[in-house]
Image: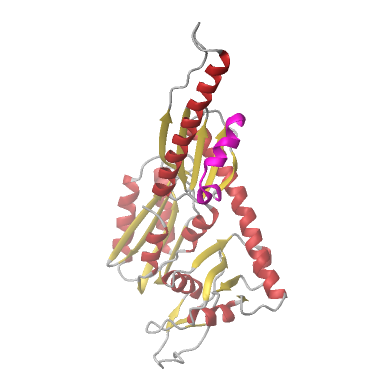
Amino acid sequence: MLNIEAVEKLAKIEGENLISLYLSTDRKKFSPLTIKTKAKDLFKNINLPGKSDIEQKVLKLLDKVSPNTKSVVVFASENFWSVFAFAFTVGDLLTVDRCFNLTPLLRLFSENRSVGVLLLDAERARFLEIFLGDLKDHKHLEDQVVRKQANGGWSKERFERHREEIIKRHLKRVVEFLIKMHKAYKCEYLFLRIDPELEHEFLKLLPKDIKERLKGHIRVDMDASPSEIIEKANALMKEEVRGEEENRVRELFRHLTHGESERVVAGLNDVLDALYNKKISILLVNEGYSEPGTFCTFCGYISLSEEYCPYDQSPNSRVNNIINIVIDQALKQKVEVEIFNDDKTLKDLGNIGAFLKEH
């Protein structure tokens, strides 16, 4: 399963000739033969020991890929093999370096959040967990509510009070149900579909930590299909993410223009210094940013050009893209990494910046 913990484990792996392969396998766009040809073309552009064996292993893997899988990601070396399959498209890419290229994966985490959707009326509740554009789980809850007064017996007022009490108990059950879902899935965003007459009472019952995750309403019917709910929830989620990204870069820029160097840094050299000294809390990088450089395998010192580590005097290893090393080191330090899609403000700041830890 792909999650941030799996990415962090990949970040810990270092060595010679580590292969990162991202391949679109969308059957609506490519035939099985075309998909294999694309993979072969990517391997033609690299030269490393054991390439043929890994290439054949990839081609055999493609024979087993489900028709519903739109992308395959492989991390491999002579002694390592890990595969992820996705129901959405990633661009074709193959890199070879001293670490795995995790930037495209982290971009997925940056532009996608785990989403909970709660659909609620006076009798039912449906909860869906959506992650990386796909349905992960779907739970139901239902209570019986008296719809109309039987002939004779209670007065209309008494009947309405009785019905209101039943609905209140239903809402309390739904909140308990939602708390369990929150503990199980820890969704970052929550979208709500609720009958207007129930909303005020329901929101009063919600715990603060869940209410903070509530990002707004989703306009669907109670009986909407999962595919419709997923489509609308993903659109709402992406809008929220775009706003958060803009605010994050705007905040970085504001601190920089106010000379608050104790809070933020920007540009590769300042980021490298802060990373080596373990001062970074959040790292911001534009996807596609690349710089060749060197890396000390003993202490983790990263440089654009130095042949020897200034701290332990050992020879540095040359790497094709030190930004991948920067991201790996950040993940090892449990730094939050956000990858941006060519953000202009971040580009003007050197394509990389960071928020520093508060002391």
Describe the colour scheme in one phrase: secondary structure
Q: Nearer the viewer, residue 268 or 330?
A: 330
Residue at 52% x, 86% y is: 305
Q: Is residue 232 left or right of residue 257?
A: left
Q: Percent from the top left, x then y, of residue 170?
A: 47, 30
- Asked whether the viewer can see residue 333, the reply is yes
Q: Quadrant of the C terminus?
A: bottom right
Residue at 43% x, 60% y is: 42
Q: Percent from the top left, x then y, of residue 246?
A: 65, 59
Image vertical order of residue 76 relative to residue 226, above or below: below
Image vertical order of residue 85 relative to residue 280, above or below: above
Does the magenta-highlighted stretch encompass residue 209?
yes
Q: Which residues are magenta?
A: 195-212
| Quadrant position of residue 299 | bottom left
| Quadrant position of residue 243 | bottom right
- Asked whether the viewer can see residue 293, the reply is no
Q: Percent from the top left, x then y, of residue 220?
A: 57, 31
Image vertical order of residue 357 relative to residue 53, above or below: below
Q: Nearer the viewer, residue 35 or 71?
A: 71
Q: Percent from the top left, x then y, of residue 272?
A: 53, 80
